[in-house]
Image (cartoon, helix red, strand yellow):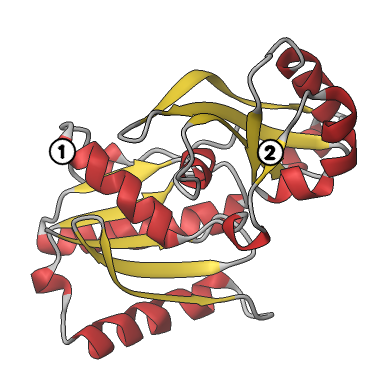
Amino acid sequence: MKILAVDTSSKICSVAILEDDNVLLEKSTNDEKTHSQNLMPLIDELFKETNLSLENIDLLACCQGPGSFTGIRIGIATIKAFSDAKKIPVTCVTALESLAYNVNTNGLIVSLIDAKNDNVYYSMHSFDGNSYNLIGEYKSDNIQNILDDLSIYDDSLIFVGDGAIAHKEKIETYIKNPIFVPENQNAQTSISIGKSAYNKFKNGIYGDSNFILPIYLKKSQAERHLDGEP
């Protein structure tokens, strides 16, 4: 099956086409333009270079967050429009889950996305060589609170994401024998979105355009301002 995957939840705008879980082509940009300016041209380039079109796509996938509020909405709106126009099934993947898919080492994977001011988006997944399974819940919290919770683990934890880079020294202080992935595995990409989406589809986790719902985990800056929060 051919999958069109989109991730606009971070600073990187990334799109990919996969055949099952094999990557046919991936395109990304990290320039000063907004994702609304970059997304459609990147998708157009994908189709031209693979000699494919929406008519050939069997599954649409996008990142549902957490991350940039505006970016998440751009990706979701685009995938919803494609799904409605061509009646293509869709599924969605959290940014934290997609980061776990960057790691191919068995064990407990801690995904951390920097949310500024010592806060992170967090999740833990286990990987046994075949499947990734969420342990607990997706969270938004202060990095110290997350590390206090993780300090109970005797197994080496594998850290991935820009939050792991931002807080590496603190992680090394509070966690026993932490493992950090190579630098190029810390970026959120549409490739990981596509691979996760393929597994979700095989397990019956997909639907029509209404299936996609954003996950923000915290209030927007405007909402925090209205509530008198920092």
Q: Residues within 10 Å of mark 2 (few under 14, many from 20)?
A: some
| Residue 230 seen | no
162 with respect to 170 (left or right): left
Tell me the number on the disc at residue 179. Answer: 2
Circle 2 sits in a helix, a strand or a loop, which is it? strand
Q: Residues within 10 Å of mark 1 (few under 14, many from 20)?
A: few
Q: Earlier in the sequence, mark 2 or mark 1?
A: 2
Q: Nearer the viewer, mark 2 or mark 1?
A: 2
- Identified by mark 2, the residue type is Ile
Residue 188 screen position, x and y as percent? 55, 56
Instruction: From this view, report whether residue 100 is shown above or below residue 59.
Output: above
215 or 21, which lies in front?
Answer: 21
- Residue at image x 16%, y 72%? 54
Circle 1 sits in a helix, a strand or a loop, which is it? helix
Residue 101 screen position, x and y as percent? 44, 45
Instruction: From this view, report whether residue 184 is shown above or below residue 161.
Output: below
Whether residues under marks 2 and 1 lie with C-beta atoms below 8 angstroms apart, the answer is: no
- Identified by mark 1, the residue type is Lys
In the rendered view of the protein, which quadrant contains the C terminus?
Answer: top right
C-alpha span from label 2 to label 1: 31 Å
106 or 217, which lies in front?
Answer: 106
Residue 113 screen position, x and y as percent? 67, 43
Q: Quadrant of residue 86?
A: bottom left
Which residue bears the numbered disc 1? 202
Q: Quadrant of residue 71?
A: bottom right
Instruction: From this view, report whether residue 34 is shown above or below residue 220.
Output: below
Tell me the number on the disc at residue 138. Answer: none
- Residue at image x 63%, y 19%? 155
- Residue at image x 25%, y 89%? 48
163 with respect to 167 (left or right): left
Residue 110 screen position, x and y as percent? 61, 32
32 with respect to 171 (left or right): left
